[in-house]
Image (spheres, helix red, strand yellow):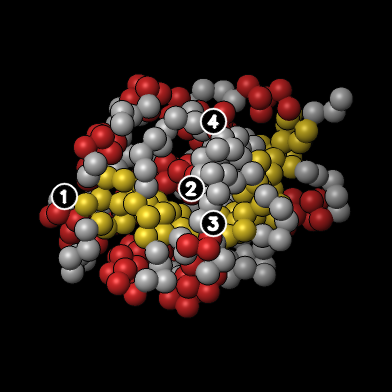
Amino acid sequence: MAISPFLKTHAPKAQWLQHLESGDVRPYVYVRSENQIPQPGSRHKLDWFPWAPVMIEPLNINEIEFAERIFHLENTAFGPSAMAIPRWVFYDCAVMPGFVAGFAMKTEKLSATMRKALNIRGQHEWTPLSLFIIIPTMKKGEWVAHNLCAVNALLEEKDRFYALGFLSKAFGLWYANVETCCGMTQWGNTALKLHSHYGHLEVLTAYTPVHSHAKTITYRSQVNVGCWENFFTREDDLEFLEKYEPSGLMIDPTQENSMIDLHRRIQKGDGPYFLGALDIAAKKLTDPLIVYRRKKA
């Protein structure tokens, strides 16, 4: 099947997508059989992912090699920040209750650089290039994005797969028919530039001392595929501009007091407050960000 016209036109740097047409790269779904998604991809109308994913059963011990490659990718990407997932957390909190997906490449097609970065051993046909984990919550339709990483974190810029991380999360949200997505990331992290493009980003916590990293933002987005194209085009999100206005507040991602002040306002019920994807994209990671609120009727 062909690459969608939008991605072909607006993501020319994502040349790795050509491997999808040849069959050398495929989305994968690493989910136990009881957690399979009914009617995958039926909630959000999108033509980006027409390829049937590689289905892998995590409870099958014959598939342990694929799991080991996931562990290596995730641990190497997050090890330096001391946030790598222990094996038991991956199994207890991701495999058993949740949904794991991403993109994988036929092992025989990996470049020497990628083989070295991924520490390839064994003979499994597929090697994961990315990982996205989402876990359902007790609130109907709401999921928590637990982890997202890609091989790009292990490669030099010239060898990276452009937008692999963004498209991996997009695939997971689309395939699993996710209505509402919550997540966590740290202020000043490049991940915020990515996560803000899946739907209008509401700030649930601006300061999170219960987390290992107190300078963590917890966000919630109503998944909206209409926002996704803006990640590539950098065009204004007209729907966001129609719904929200600057609140007069700013959040400084370098100042703990700024985070605490905004969080206390949220805690008092002054919100909800939102961040704008294009504001985040246009600024340095250390620049203050505009805090938005819903326009008054």
**Quadrant in which residue 23 is drawn:** top left
The residue where tag 2 is placed is: 172
Task: State the residue in front, 126 or 112.
Answer: 126
One can see residue 141 in this view: yes
The residue where tag 1 is placed is: 109
Task: State the residue in front, 150 or 246.
Answer: 150
Quick one: label 4 or label 1, which is nearer the N terminus?
4
Specify whether 131 is left or right of 65.
right
Residue type marked 2: Gly
Circles 3, 2 touching at the beta carbon (< 8 Å): yes
Residue 76's spot in the image, x, y percent? 33, 66
Residue type marked 4: Lys
**Quadrant in which residue 112 is drawn:** bottom left
From the viewer's perspective, is the residue at label 4 or at label 3 nearer? 4
Q: Measure the alpha-carbon separation of dots 4 and 1.
A: 32 Å
Quick one: label 3 or label 2, which is nearer the N terminus?
3
Quick one: label 2 or label 4, which is nearer the N terminus?
4
Circles 1, 3 touching at the beta carbon (< 8 Å): no
Q: Residues within 10 Å of mark 3 (few under 14, many from 20)?
A: many
Q: Measure the alpha-carbon separation of dots 2 and 4.
A: 14 Å
The residue where tag 3 is placed is: 134
